[in-house]
Image (cartoon, grey):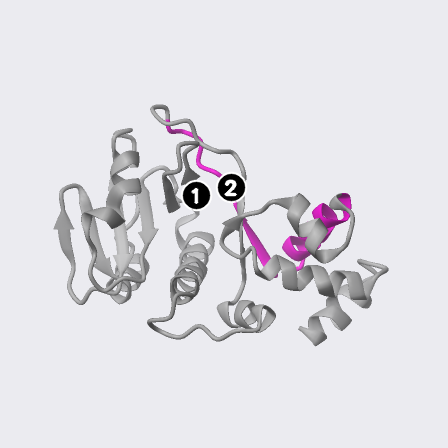
Amino acid sequence: MGSYLQQEIVAEGAIRNVPAFSRFLKVAALCNGKIVNFTNVANDAQVPRTTVYEYFEILKDTLVLHEVPAWQKSRKRKPLVSSKYYFFDVGVVAALQGRTFRVGSPDFGEALETFLFQELIAYCDYISGDTVCHWRSKSGFEVDFIIGDHTAVEIKASKNISNQHLKALRALAEEQTLKRYLCVCQEERPRSIDMVSVIPFKDFLDRLWDGEYIK
């Protein structure tokens, strides 16, 4: 990210304190794929809370970070309204976090989710025009992505999906609002569990780019 700091941040005069922004960048990477607690980020990065908001805007403006707003159309379970944020590249996230995402490791789920999000947002931006949101109820149910108002997508790194993995999708399905409920995972073959389609992530990508998940 050295070139980014020099070319996009310093050269454009976006910030005055490069060391502070560099500290913030590493803390922000730890928030990848999560709802951000801006107060905690400010404390960890040792910068004012108002500055954290400004820094997040800089990351969005320079296309390093993508904001995923909350899907708020559920009625049976009150949704949270906070956004999640994803970095533009899973390798950059790993470098900033100082770790390596390996298949089978506890951290691999985050890497898979980030990678599939990047594909999903590229498809929606360039092909379908759909928005991508996330859903989290105040009672704790959470679904990774909502495509438009028609498809829910939950990412799981598991090779063996059980009913436990599908609780959030089933809770969302009670709203009877969306058309599809997908659990994208590492299983070898697609199958259905009640209203949920369990899909290997490679199959999901093929179907996505073939235009299967359109309204």
Residue farthest along the top direction in this orientation: 75
- Which residue, given by chain and number where applicable, does mark 2 sit on? 69
What range is drawn magenta here?
A: 50-74
Which residue is at the front of the view, 41 or 72?
Answer: 41
Label 2 neighbour load within 10 Å: few <14, some 14-19, many 20+: some
Residue 95 placement (x, y as % from top left): 57, 73
Query: Quadrant of residue 18 in the image?
Result: bottom right
Label whose residue precedes the other's in the sequence (1 or 2) = 2
Residue 148 appears anywhere in the view: yes
Residue 39 placement (x, y as % from top left): 67, 44
The disc at residue 134 is 1
Quadrant housing the C terminus: top left
Quadrant housing the N terminus: bottom right
**Element type at marker 1?**
strand
Say whether residue 92 is left or right of residue 204: right
Q: How many marks?
A: 2
Label 1 neighbour load within 10 Å: few <14, some 14-19, many 20+: many
Query: Quadrant of residue 205 in the image?
Result: bottom left
